Image (spheres, rainbow, N blue to C red):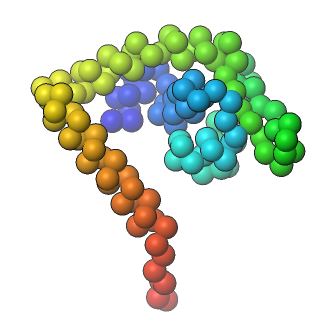
């Protein structure tokens, strides 16, 4: 799925998640981006640095808390998102072909449940024996 998405939309899925999250939410802290995009903080920082060098993202210290770094799309970044959104929509339209609206809704609900269950399972640690 990731390879097909990247080929069709023109962006690797982790990068796209960051761009799309900033598009939907505006300015975000790096911590929130890491959580929403399901990326570890180090990977997120590397991706943000690369996008900052491309002129797509601006990062700055939070005016209320210097320990927090915020990210936002630049006008160039917004143009990148605007250009990719129709390709993203076409990708998902093709991927969901043959499913009724009810089936798509059921699939979405089931994937939400699985995502919550995976998050819970990942947070519940069991001791590993040597």
Q: Residue 84 appears at what percent x and percent y? A: 47, 15
The number of numbered discs placed on residues in the rendered structure image is 0
Q: Residue 58 appears at what percent x and percent y? A: 75, 26
Q: Which residue lies furthest to the front in this view?
A: 64
> Would you identify the image quadrant in which residue 86 lies?
top left
Inspect this view and state whether residue 110 appears: yes
- Location of the N terminus by quadrant is top left
- At 47% from the left and 88% from the top, the residue drawn is 129
> Would you identify the image quadrant in which residue 89 lies?
top left
Q: In this view, does 122 lie to the left or right of 112?
A: right
Q: Is residue 62 left or right of residue 46?
A: right
Q: Nearer the viewer, residue 80 or 106?
A: 106
Q: Check the image and report above or below for 120 versus 37.
A: below
- At 48% from the left and 75% from the top, the residue drawn is 125
Q: Residue 32 appears at what percent x and percent y? A: 63, 44
Q: Residue 6 appears at what percent x and percent y? A: 43, 27
- At 36% from the left and 60% from the top, the residue drawn is 117
Q: Which of 109 and 85 is in front in this view?
A: 109
Q: Check the image and report above or below for 2 versus 129.
A: above
Q: Which residue lies furthest to the bottom in this view?
A: 130
Inspect this view and state whether residue 50 appears: no
Q: Check the image and report above or below for 41 versus 64.
A: below
Q: Nearer the viewer, residue 27 or 57?
A: 27
- At 46% from the left and 20% from the top, the residue drawn is 10
């Amino acid at each position: 799925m990731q390879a097909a998405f990247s080929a069709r939309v023109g962006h690797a899925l982790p990068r796209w998640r960051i761009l799309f999250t900033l598009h939907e939410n505006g300015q975000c802290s790096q911590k929130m981006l890491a959580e929403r995009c399901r990326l570890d903080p180090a990977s997120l920082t590397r991706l943000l640095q690369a996008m900052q060098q491309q002129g797509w993202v601006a990062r700055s210290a939070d005016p209320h808390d210097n320990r927090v770094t915020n990210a936002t799309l630049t006008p160039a970044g917004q143009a990148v998102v605007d250009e990719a959104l129709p390709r993203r929509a076409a990708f998902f339209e093709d991927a969901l072909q043959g499913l009724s609206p009810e089936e798509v809704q059921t699939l979405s609900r089931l994937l939400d449940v699985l995502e919550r269950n995976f998050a819970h399972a990942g947070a519940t640690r069991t001791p590993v024996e040597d």
